[in-house]
Amino acid sequence: MIDPRLRTLQLVAHHGSVSAAARALHFTASAVSQQLRGLSDDLGVVLVRQVGRHMEPTAAGRVLLRHTATLHAAAETARAELAGTDDAPGTIGLCGFSTAATRFLVPTAAALRERFPALAIQVVEEEPARCIDLLLAGDCDLALVVVDDRVPPASDARFEQHAVLDDPMDLAVPVGHPLTTRAVVTLRDAAAESWITCRPASAYHRLTLAACLAAGFRPRVAHHAEEWDTGTALVAHGFGIFMLPRLAPVHPGTDVVRLRLSGPTAPVRRIVAVTRAGAAGQPVIAHALRSITAAAAGTST
């Protein structure tokens, strides 16, 4: 419905990089550059320029990006109206980070399959920043993400954000740890501990670092674990401690104690559902949002 080169321009502006936009779109960098040159030639204006190590939109590019956001929102609204005139609901892509995919996206996919038997559904587990790329590229229709500095603000005209859940972060320590004897535990109490986090670029690592810095210390990271099971195993064997989302389970019999954190710096991860602007009016997406909201309301945190 809309010139696909506008989507390419959006992603280059979003990432400040041709190569990053190319990865998000599954294109080559030369293909992205060619699209930008073609769009610039057709419009007779320069749309992006190199500023230091980043690509930035020119004044003309910013004007076009503003209209592009309006165009895409109108297209999503049109799709919503078209969906209301046809019994065949088409397709939907759902993406989200691991815990949200397990707790919310899979049950939502099952609810959609029951409500819309002809619907083609795809569930993708991805990091929050990658989920935003999938939305921008049109490869996904609804994303569950943890809000951090890589997620666009709620005011971003390209998207609509829908509150899902505030998920408190607990402290996982081994059985017999001195902190287990305390009636009240704050994050600052764990400042001298060895910490376990995910890889440095991950959303969880960034959340851990931000929470510890807010509590007045920089954590001494001793180990990296991508899965909660690996993290709890390291904790159980005395290799360190780590923060565990309330939504993430600990298997029975694991020698780990889960401590609820207190105090003004007690960390919470905010989970939101993100859609492209105008898309929430589509019956399938609206049903998915209701299903996610109901699942979150039934979650004990």
Image: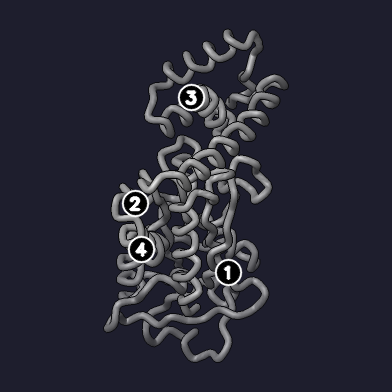
- Give the mark nearer the N terminus: 4 vs 3: 3
Q: Residue at x 55, y 35 (%)?
A: 75
Element assignment for label 1: loop
State the residue lying farthest toward the front. 85
Q: Is residue 145 left or right of residue 91?
A: right
Q: Nearer the viewer, mark 2 or mark 1?
A: 2
Element assignment for label 2: strand
Residue in front for this viewpoint, 45 or 189:
45
Q: Is residue 155 left or right of residue 28?
A: right
Q: Amino acid at mark 3?
A: Pro
Give the residue number, with chain letter if any, for mark 4: 111
Q: Amino acid at mark 4?
A: Ala
Element assignment for label 3: helix
Q: Residue 60 — which label?
A: none
Q: Amino acid at mark 1?
A: Pro
Give the residue number, with chain letter if any, for mark 2: 123
Asked whether the viewer can see residue 186, the reply is yes
- Give the mark nearer the N terminus: 2 vs 3: 3
Element assignment for label 4: helix
Compared to residue 118, the image places residue 67 above or below, namely above
Q: Residue 267 — which label?
A: 1
Q: Residue at x 47, y 47 (%)?
A: 84
Q: Is residue 191 left or right of residue 299?
A: right
Residue 33 percent across, percent down from the top left: 49, 17
Residue in front for this viewpoint, 265 or 286:
286
Give the residue number, with chain letter if any, for mark 3: 4
Compared to residue 38, the image places residue 162 above or below, namely below
